[in-house]
Amino acid sequence: MSVIVDVVLGIQHGDEGKGKVTHHLLKSGDYTHCVRYNGGCNAGHTIYHEGVKFVTHHIPAGVFFGVKSIIGPGCVLDVHKFLAEIQMLKEGGINIENKIYVAKNAHIIQEVHRWMDHDETRVGTTRTGNGPCYSDKYGRGGLRAYQTKELQPYLLDMYEEFYIHQPDAVVLCEGAQGFALDVDWGDYPYVTSSHCTTAGALLNGFNPKSLRKIYGVAKVYETYVGAKSFQPANPVFDKIQNAGEEYGATTGRKRQCNWMSLDILLKAVQMNGVDHLIINKLDVLEEVDEWSVRLGESLLTFQNKDQFTNYVSQYLSGVEVTFSGSPHRI
Ligand code: IMP
Ligand code: MG
C-alpha cells in the first residue's frame, strides 16, 4: 500500500478558481485527505457549498465534505485567523469535528511578521506577514506549529499519518496562489514566498512516486494583484474587470486584467506536468464578447468563442482542456 496524491494548482497569478475545482473533485468521495501545501492567509479561496458562499484563507476545501483537511508543512499559519475560520465554518453549519489538522512543522506567522509586512509597497503583498514568516523559516529563526499552545488539539505528523497510520490514503493536494507567483519561476520579485508548483506539493512529505493526476487551473483572461503594472490601456479590460468581479478575496484590491498568455500557459503546463487543464470564466468573455490571447509579443484576435476555444485547445494539445463558464460548477 502506498499513498496516492492528486494535485490541484493554479498556473497563472492565483485567483484562477482553484477552490471551485477542488470542491468539485472532492464531491466524488474518492479522497480520504485534503492538504493545503503552500502559502498562508494571503490566499483566499471562494467556495460555493450547497448554495452558500464561503471564503477560506487557511483551511482546505476538504472540510466541506467531512474529508480530513490538513494545513501542510509548506504553509505558514496565522493562528488567530485560523481559529476565526474554524468558528466561521461552525457557524455556517459545517461539521468540522476531528476534520481539521495542522502539520507540526508548519510555520507560524507572528506579530513581528505582520508588522514588517503591514505597509509593504515594493512587491504589493497582501500584507498578511507571509514573506517575513518564510524569511524567518529559511533563516532558521521561525516558530513551528508544535510550539504554539492554541494549536495543540490540531497537530498532526505528516510522516506518521501517511506512512504509518494511513498508507492507503488518497490525497488531494490543494495549491495556493499560482505558477506565475512562484518564488523560483514567477516574475521575481513580483512573487509570493512559497512554492506554488506541483513540486511544492511533494515538499510536504509525499513520495514523488505517489503522484497520480495533476489538475492545472487557469482563467480565460489573466488577472494580477500587486505592485507591477500589468493591465494595458484598453477599455476592454475595465469591462472584463467588472463582468468578472475581479477584486481580491483577501484584500479587496482591484485585480489588473490582461489577455491570457498562451506560451506562458504552455510553459506552466509543461513544468508542472499538468494532465488536465480547467480554464475558468468563459462566461465573462462571453459577456464582453471579445476574444484575444497573447502569444509571445503578438496579440491574436478571434471572431467568436468557438474560434477562440479551438485555437487554445489545439495550442495545448496533449493536455485535456475543459472550459468552464459557471462559478458554481465545471
Ligand atoms: P504575499 O504573498 O502576500 O507576500 O504577496 C506577494 C504577491 O502575491 C503580491 O503580488 C500578492 O498580491 C500576490 N498574492 C498573494 N496571494 C495571492 C492570492 O491568493 N491571489 C492572488 N495574488 C496573490
Ligand atoms: Mg484567491
Image: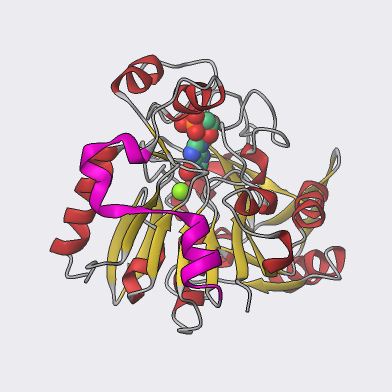
As drawn, 144 above or below 162: above
Residue 257 counted in the magenta span: no
Towards the viewer: 307 or 27: 27
Task: Locate the N terminus and report the quarter of the image it occupies.
Answer: bottom right
Residue 225 in sight from this viewpoint:
no
Res. 100 image quadrant: bottom left
Q: In the rendering, at what x and y percent does residue 277 appear?
A: 69, 67
Dominant SS type (magenta): helix
Q: Where does residue 94 sit, x and y in percent of width and height? A: 22, 70
Residues in magenta? 145-167
Question: Taking the image as drawn, is residue 296 in sight?
Answer: yes
Image x and y of residue 301, in percent: 78, 54
Numbered label tally: 0
From what the image shows, is residue 187 above or below residue 104?
above
Q: Is residue 199 left or right of residue 112?
A: right
Q: Is 253 in front, or is 267?
A: 267
163 in the magenta segment: yes
Q: How is the image coloured?
A: secondary structure
On screen, residue 215 versus residue 76, left or right, reads right
Q: What residue sits 52% from the left and 49% below the top?
A: 176
**Residue 41 drawn above or below residue 268:** above
Task: Tell me: residue 312, above or below residue 177.
Answer: below
Q: Residue at x 41, y 43 (%)?
A: 247
Q: Residue at x 70, y 30 (%)?
A: 187
- Find residue 256 and report its image quarter: top right
Name of the residue lying farthest toward the left:
91
Q: 215 or 209: which is nearer to us? A: 209
